[in-house]
Image (cartoon, grey):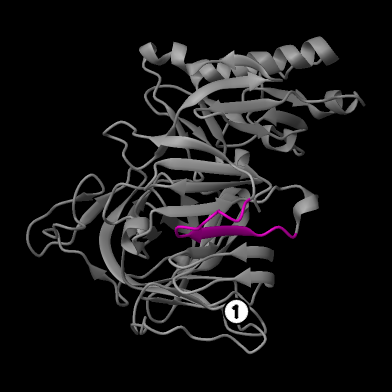
Amino acid sequence: LIIHTITAYSNDTAVIVTPTLSTYYFVEVRIGLPRVDAKYCIPLSANQPHQHIHVGKTLASGFPSLTIHTTTVSSNDTAIAVMPTLSAYYFVEARIGLPRFRVKLALSTSTPTTWVQSADCVVCLDVPSKSMNFDPADGFEPVLGDDSKYCVPPVAKTATLGDPCRYVLGFSQGILGNDTFSLVSPPSTSSPPPSLEINHFIFGVGKQNMVNFGAHSPIVGQLGLGKGHPSSTLSQLNISRFSYCLPPSNSNHQNTTATLEFGPKAGLTTAYYYNTPIVEGPPDNPFDYYINLIEIAINNASVYTPSKQRERGEPGFVIDVGATVTLLYKEAYIRVKDAVMEYLSSNFGLYPVYPSRPVSKPPIYELCYYNQDLESITTLTYPNISFHFEGGAVLQLPESQAFHNFVDELQTCLVMIPRTGTEPSRLGASQQRGWRFTYDILQSELSFAPNGC
C-alpha cells in the first residue's frame, strides 16, 4: 500500500491498518519479553530519516514495507497500516511475547479490550492452522481476580485472591493478563518491520470465542477501540482521539492506504469533514459510539425518521467498524427496502428475486436482483442512499457500498440487514469505505469526511 501524505504532531499516534480479504481491519502487536526500553526511539535507515515514531513511553519506527512519499511525524506520534481480508473485516498485525508471535487482529469499535485466541481454546475460531493461536505460557502474566483497576465489571468478573481474572465480552471469554504488545507494519525485504512496543499491555486470552470471521480466516482476535473500561486500548495509551480510513474496494483505489491514527491531531489532515455529537448509550452498552440519526433518505427524499419511532423503544444508532455490513432497526430497513424496490420497478421495470436465496452465510440479504436483468438495462442507475445525523452531517453511500454483485450467485443485493430486539442499528465497515472517521472521546464528537484515505 502507498501512504501519500500523513501528518501527525506532538502527542499523536498514527498506526497503519492492514485490510484483509474480507472487510475487517487489523493491526499487528507484540506481547512478552524481553521488555524493550521505551525511552528511546530507534532511528531508521539513512534514506528514511523522518519516519521514526516515539509514542509516550513506547517505542516505534517507520513503515519500510510501504512506499511512503510524504510522512512526517514527531515525538509522541505513531502510524500503522491496516489490511482488508476477502470478507468484510479489516485487521492489523501485531506481535506478542517472546519470541515475537505474530497475530492478525480485527478492528472493533464496539469492544474496549483487545483479545487474542488462546492455544488451549475450547470454543475456537476457524483459523487455517492451530499454530496461529497464542500460547499464554510464554511470558503472559494473568491479572489477579482481586485487581481493583482492571478486573472490574462489565468486562471482567472479580474473583478471589490469587485466582486469575476472567473477562466476558459476549463473543469471547477467557483470562485477562498482560505482556509486551506491538503494533507493526507488514515485513519489508529491505529492512526489518517497525513496531510500536507497549510494555505490560492488558489484553485477553480467549478460551471461548464465538465470533465468526469467516472460514479459515487469518484473524485470531480483535484490537479493541471501544470506550468505557480501564482495560481498553485507548485508556491504556491515555488517548482520547483516533481516526481511520478504510479504502474503497474498486480498482481505481488499489494504491490507497488504510491508516489508523491516534492522538489530538488524528484525522485533522482532511480538509473538509462533517461533525456530529457522540451521545451516551444505554447503561448496559457503554462501549459503543452512539450518534443521533435524524433521517434516512433515498434520492434526497426522507423515507425514515427515527424520532417518530423512539416512543416504541428504538435502540439507537452506532458506528461499528467491526460489523461487516450495516444492520438497520427493522422499521428503518423496511422503509429503505420498499423505497429501493419502488425506484427500480417504476423506473426500470425491475423486480427482486423472490424468495431471495441466501447469498452469504452469514449474512442473508433480503433484497436481491438477478444480474442478467440488471445488465440488460444500459441506462440503469441505482438510488442514492444517505444517512443524516445531528448537526447536519450527511453520509451518502456510493453505489458500490450500498449494493454488491455476488458473481457466483448471479445476484446483486442491497448489503443491509434488518435487526430486531433491543440491539442498535450499526453502520458497518462496508458502508464506511472511502470515508475517514475520527472519534474524539474528550469532545464527544464524531467527524467524517469523503475521500479521506
328 on left or right of 19: left
306 on left or right of 341: left
Seen in the picture, residue 68 relative to 253 is either above or below; the reply is below
Q: Amino acid at mark 1?
A: His
381 on left or right of 259: right
Counting from the top left corner in percent of width and height, residue 152 is at 18, 51
Is residue 205 visible to the viewer in this orientation of the structure? yes
Is residue 1 visible to the viewer in this orientation of the structure? no
Q: For the view shown, which residue lies furthest in the left direction?
A: 161
**Would you identify the image quadrant in which residue 59 lies?**
bottom left
Query: In front: 278, or 88?
Result: 278
**Residue drawn at (65%, 13%) of the image:** 338
Q: Which residues are magenta?
A: 255-270
Q: Residues within 10 Å of mark 1 (few under 14, many from 20)?
A: some
Query: In front: 374, or 296?
Result: 296
Counting from the top left corner in percent of width and height, residue 179 is at 31, 72
Seen in the picture, residue 66 relative to 441 is either above or below; the reply is below
Q: Secondary structure at mark 1?
A: loop
**Would you identify the image quadrant in which residue 185 lies?**
bottom right
Residue assigned mark 1? 50
**Residue drawn at (46%, 68%) of the image:** 10
Main SS, magenta residues? loop
Counting from the top left corner in percent of width and height, residue 27 is at 51, 62
Q: Does residue 257 belong to the magenta stretch? A: yes
